[in-house]
Image (cartoon, helix red, strand yellow):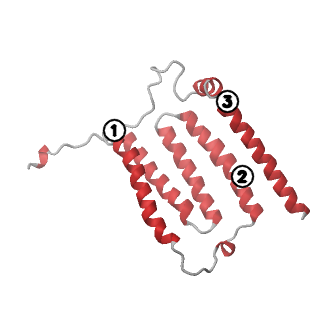
Amino acid sequence: MDINQIPIPNVSPNLVIVSLFSLIAVVTGIGVVAFNNPIRSMLSLVANFFTLAFIYFSMGAEMMGIQQIVVYTGAIMVLFLFVIMLLNLSTDSLTMTRKFDVKPFLAVPVGLGVFALIASQILLPFKDTRTPSAPDATAVSVGWGSPQALGRALFTGYVWPFEIISLLLMVGIVGAILLARRRVEA
C-alpha cells in the first residue's frame, strides 16, 4: 500500500483547540478526585470550570461560557471554599488507618465498566465529526446561545422546573443557616 493512498483526516484548528481543552478538562477532573487535600481538589475544580468555559467560547457559545465563569467558578467555588473552611477539613482528619478493605479493588473494574459504557454511548456517535460548532445562528430565530434565547426558553418551556429549583435552593439555604446556628449555640 502506497503512503500517498492513505486518507488524511481533515482536522480544523477549532477541533485541535477543543481537543486540547478537553484533555485539560479530563486531567483537572481527575485531579478533583485524586487529591487528598480539599484545597488542592477545589483548585483543580476551578481549573476544570475555566477549561469548560474556554471550550464553550471556542464553540461559539459565549453566553454559556460567561455563565460557566460567573455562576460556577465564581459563586459555587466560593460556596465550596466556605464549606471547607466551616468544616475545617484537613488531610489529617481525612486519613484513617483501616484494615483490609475490598472497596478499592471493586472500584477499578466497576469504574472501567462505567467508562466503557459512557464511551460507547457518547464517543462512538461522534467518530465522523470533523469540526465542533454551535448551531448556525442564522438558522435559529433569535440566535442560539444568546441571552434572549436563553430567557425565552427558561421562562416559557422550563418555568416550572426553574421555580422548583429555586425552592430547592431556598430550602438548602435555610438548612445551612439552621445547621450553622446549631453549631454556634452548642
How many numbered badges does the structure rendering display? 3
Residue on which the image places disc 2:
79
Q: Within 10 Å of the Cα at label 2, are there few (<14), some (14-19), or many (20+) other Cα atoms? A: few
For marks 2 and 3, give the one nearer the viewer.
3
Instruction: Between residue 173 and residue 140, name the one nearer to us.
Output: 173
| Furthest-right residue in this view | 185
Q: In which quarter of the image is the C terminus?
A: bottom right
> Which residue type does callout 1 highlight?
Thr
Q: In this view, does 141 lie to the left or right of 6?
A: right
Residue plotted at (54% across, 34% down): 62
Q: In this view, does 56 lie to the left or right of 71?
A: left
User: Residue 14: x percent and y percent?
Assistant: 39, 40
On the image, numbered disc 3 is attached to which residue? Answer: 160
Q: How far apart are marks 1 and 3 (CA)?
A: 35 Å
Secondary structure of residue under mark 3: helix
Vertical order, 148 against 118 (above or below): above
Most foreground residue, 54 or 100:
100
Q: Which amino acid does label 3 sit on?
A: Trp
Q: Position of residue 68 (x, y in %)?
A: 59, 42
Q: Mark 1 points at which residue?
A: 129
Please indicate whether residue 121 sits to the left or right of residue 8 in the image: right
Instruction: Report x, y in % for residue 113.
Output: 41, 58
Query: Residue 88, image x and y in percent?
Result: 75, 66
Of tags 1 and 3, the one toward the viewer is 3
Amino acid under disc 2: Leu
Sort mark 1 into few (<14), some (14-19) or many (20+) by Cα contacts within 10 Å.
Answer: few
Q: Do the residues labelled 1 and 2 touch (CB within 8 Å)?
A: no
Cα distance in 3D space between marks 2 and 3: 26 Å
What is the CA distance from the residue labelled 1 to the residue labelled 2? 38 Å
